[in-house]
Amino acid sequence: MLNIRMLYYICGVFFSAMLLFSCHSAKQEEQHDEGIQTGDLLFVGLPLDFHLTDSTSMDNAITSATGREGEINYIHVAILERDEQDSLWVIDATLKHGVDRHPFRVYLTDFTLNDGSYPVMAVMRLKDNTNASTYVDNAKTFVGRGYDMYFSSDNTEQYCSELVRNSYITSTGEYLFSEYPMNFKSEDGTFPPYWIELFGLLDEPIPQGEMGTNPNVMSQESCLMKVGTISMDGGKVMVR
């Protein structure tokens, strides 16, 4: 079963008072593969048939709405940064921290599964990576903002792929990543119970068809290429 703590990091929301979670500690300081560069994007994925015991959980709702049969379903996206000391940082938008910048070891701990393994973590890079550091600097200007529980572009808060889109913008104001009509429905045309309950608590309509982003679609953008998949070799982060 997925560590419930990970649910804080999936591109969806829930209230912490409703969650119980177990913790896994990172016992080793990570070293980093030279293939990871500032501005790379980290997509976190689960198989389409992955299930929690709770059928109304967030990842099931996202998988139902955005997953493609037989493929990995990307449920979260984060921005990677390597500083001058060669330390690896993550900038992302989550319910737990809002928009935050934290060491990769913190990110890795939060994504540890109950059996000690990790979900798929794919590293993707812009084909034209010239201005990557500028996009990372853009992302840092959002740090401290809250998590966008409404999946709306009409507020200053950010959800994970929204943060990436609003950070990867050229000096002339052009977005590198596109928006699409958002889908919250399952293949049978119904809304999964999670979304019904969530937006009911928010007293807001489900924003079906509103323009927005999601990690699954973003991972397929033509401006990106896949670098590899992260694996842990002892305490070292490897991209293969």
Image (cartoon, helix red, strand yellow):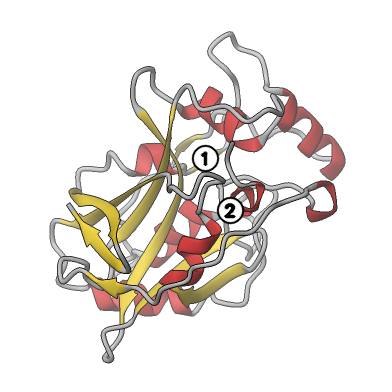
Q: Earlier in the sequence, mark 1 or mark 2?
A: 2
Q: Pointer 1: residues within 10 angstroms few (<14), some, or many (20+)?
A: some
Q: Is residue 142 above or below residue 122?
A: below
Q: Is residue 220 above or below residue 157?
A: above
Quadrant occupied by the N terminus: top right
Instruction: Check disc 1 and report its element: helix, strand or loop.
Output: strand
Q: 197 and 210: which one is in front?
A: 197
Which residue is drawn at the image coordinates 57% and 27% (left, top)? Answer: 51
Q: 126 and 90: which one is in front?
A: 90
Instruction: Determine which residue is flagged by label 2.
Output: 153
User: Residue 50 appears at what percent x and percent y?
Assistant: 50, 27
User: Residue 153 appears at what percent x and percent y?
Assistant: 58, 53
Q: Amino acid at mark 2?
A: Ser
Q: Amino acid at mark 1?
A: Met
Which residue is drawn at the image coordinates 66% and 58% (left, top)? Answer: 95
User: Residue 107 appears at what percent x and percent y?
Assistant: 48, 64
Is any atom of residue 171 visible in this view? no
Q: Is residue 30 above or below residue 234?
A: below
Is 144 displayed left or right of 115 in the figure? Answer: right
Which residue is drawn at the image coordinates 83% and 44% (left, top)? Answer: 202
Q: Are marks 1 and 2 in contact (CB under 8 Å)?
A: yes
- Residue at mark 1 to residue at mark 2: CA–CA distance: 8 Å
Instruction: Check disc 2 and report its element: helix, strand or loop.
Output: loop
Q: Is residue 37 above or below residue 201?
A: below
Is 129 displayed left or right of 10 in the figure? Answer: left
Q: 193 and 161: which one is in front?
A: 193
Tag shown at residue 211: 1
Is 141 displayed left or right of 188 in the figure? Answer: left
Say which quarter of the image contains residue 232: bottom left
Q: Pointer 2: residues within 10 angstroms few (<14), some, or many (20+)?
A: some
Say which quarter of the image contains residue 9: bottom right
Tag shown at residue 19: none
